[in-house]
Image (spheres, rainbow, N blue to C red):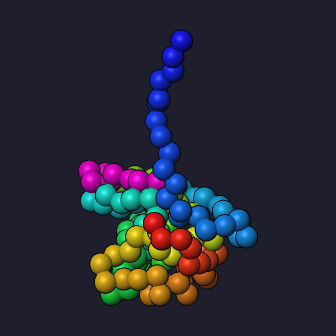
Amino acid sequence: MGYEVIGTMVPDNLIAGGDVPVLLKGVMIAKGNILKRGSVLGVVTASGKAVLADKSANDGSQVAKYILADDVDARYADVVAQCYVSGLFNRKALIFAENNTADDHEDSLRQYGIFLKDNLAC
């Protein structure tokens, strides 16, 4: 008879290859944040909760550690979200805090097993 389209998948080009194992970990996202897949996260030392990594911060979140695996809505409460802790990622698909770039965080990400590559534009 017929069929129904339940959903669609649009490649976002976030993962840039399989040369580095892609591993995930549950990370607590701080309340008050709405974050998109590909957001680069740092952890506030005092709370242990992740926020967008920001080079101008001095609370621990200036050190990029994770890349968010899925969109997260933590407007009203802290949320545990899956984050990449290793892998090879397209630097052009990453989301950064205002006035931050891949160059600002590439060294710290590398220390945590996350490598960046110039891939196709998204």
Which residue is at the front of the view, 40 or 120?
120
Looking at the image, can residue 36 be seen?
yes
Q: Residue at x 26, y 50 (%)?
A: 76
Give the farthest residue toward the front. 1
State which region is magenta: 70-77
Figure quadrant of the C terminus = bottom left
Expressed as whole percent of the image width and height from the top left, the position of residue 104 reads 44, 87
Figure quadrant of the N terminus = top right
Looking at the image, can residue 31 be seen?
no
Which residue is at the front of the view, 44 or 19?
19
What secondary structure predominates along the stretch shown in magenta?
Answer: loop
In this view, 122 is above or below 74: below
Q: Residue at x 65, y 61 (%)?
A: 23
In magenta stretch: residue 20: no
Could you tell whether 9 is left or right of 99 in the image? right
Q: Residue at x 52, y 54 (%)?
A: 11
In magenta stretch: residue 75: yes
Expressed as whole percent of the image width and height from the top left, the position of residue 35 reads 36, 60
In this view, 65 is above or below 18: below
Could you tell whether 76 is left or right of 4 in the image? left
Q: Residue at x 39, y 53 (%)?
A: 72
